[in-house]
Amino acid sequence: MTQPESVNGRKKFFGMNANVFFLGLVSLLTDVSSELIFTLVPLFLENVLGVKTSIVGFIGGLSDSTDAIFRIISGWFSDKIGKRKVLAGAGYTLSNLVKPLMYFASSWGAVAGIRFGDRIGKGVRTSSRDALIADSVTQEQRGRGFGLHRAMDTSGAFIGLLGAALIIYLVQGTGANLLAKESYRWMVIAGTIPGLLAVVVLVTLVRERKKEKVTPVDGKGVPILPAKTAFDKRFYVFLAVMALFTLGNSSDFFLILRAQNEQTPLIQVVLMLVLFNFTYSLISLPMGILSDKLGRRRVITFGWLVYALVYFGFALASHIWQIWILFAVYGIYYGIVEGAAKAFVADMVPAEKRGTAYGWFNGVVGIMALPASLIAGWMWDAFSPASTFYFGAALAFLAMLGILFFVKERTK
């Protein structure tokens, strides 16, 4: 019988392996930093630098696609060298070194360059980190593990956005509609410290899982040779469905712009994001556990339905109170899908190929983010803000059909 995939001799947290908890803490601290520094970048670009929405979409999409390319490479490389932590550490370090440079940004080109460096760091770390989480839990607890990680990650975003709201209140008060440069620079200063702490936690408290090389044998004791291909058809079909969904899942920059489009006061925009991250964090662990019991496909399908309805809502919204509700439900969508999707990847691939699998999964999602954001920005400028969200909702419905009819749940 296969032994539980855990690092032995360490205290458990919330019934999970210590690696899961400490990687969650690393993500929490990093998200405090990132939310303070990068979440309001679209408003910094439009309000301070006077950039067009299409350029905002380009920067958002380019960032995600850069991230994607490095996720693919680093995931494969972590499998090749058999090391996850070193790549995760390099990625977190790079991101948290370049983020403070946003203090000096004075053009959209500088913002794009800094964001590019940050996304390289995220690309290098993400697939290795996800594989390390998957290595540290059993299949029966995989949804719980990723759910706990997402809950902690999003709690960091919640804290970071509360900090951003406090800074705006202290610098600009409650009546401002536009972001001021002074407010943004204080956010960069405040976001630098937790980012550096995240690197310290990763280096000192996260441990590489020791793998035992065991050659499987059949009933007669004859070694079973590994398959020639790493992944089965089901994994590739799932990637194709994810690509379809992501083509309509443009950068969340557009949600922020949509809120401001309805003349929402700046501090309310930030508090809407706080609410989004609160519901995201609150529901991530329960939905991860539910995916362990009901199956990943059902949970993901339901999450995409919620997403489609939310995007229809953003297209039709005409009052600020409606935007508040939509941000809250949008957090529910994330909490339903994010952990379940990553657990689903681990269910479909061999353990020794998880880094590569997460590289392709994260890579496909990220690569499709560039055309998604370019299309969204073009539709916003050429037609209307509502058209951007109608398009996203329609592709979400198509993706639901794709996963229901073409992706089978793993049989135990």
Image (cartoon, grey):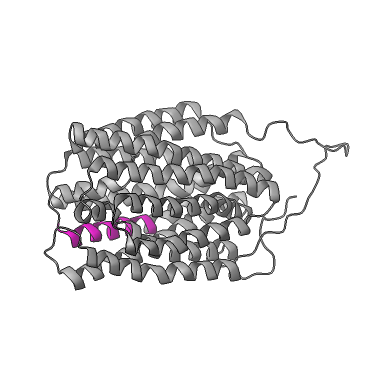
**Picture residue at 30% right of the left edge, 50% below the top:** 108
Residue 8: x and y in percent read: 69, 65
- Asked if residue 127 lies left or right of residue 333, the reply is right
Residue 397: x and y in percent read: 34, 31
Answer whether residue 299 is visible to the viewer in this image. no
Q: Viewer-proximal residue, 365 or 12?
A: 365
**Picture residue at 68% right of the left edge, 31% below the top:** 229
Q: Quadrant of the C terminus?
A: top right
**Picture residue at 66% right of the left edge, 47% below the top:** 79
Q: Viewer-proximal residue, 296 or 81?
A: 81
Q: Viewer-proximal residue, 10 or 185?
A: 185
Residue 390: x and y in percent read: 25, 33
Question: In the figure, residue 84 lies in which quadrant?
Answer: bottom right
Q: Which residues are magenta?
A: 265-281
Considering only vertical position in the picture, is 20 above or below 411?
A: below
Residue 228: x and y in percent read: 72, 31
Based on the picture, tell me whether residue 218 belongs to the magenta stretch.
no
Q: Viewer-proximal residue, 269 or 48?
A: 48
Question: In the figure, residue 18 lies in which quadrant?
Answer: bottom right
Considering only vertical position in the picture, is 382 above or below 158?
A: above
- Count numbered badges in the picture: 0
Answer whether residue 167 is visible to the viewer in this image. yes
- Magenta stretch, overall SS: helix
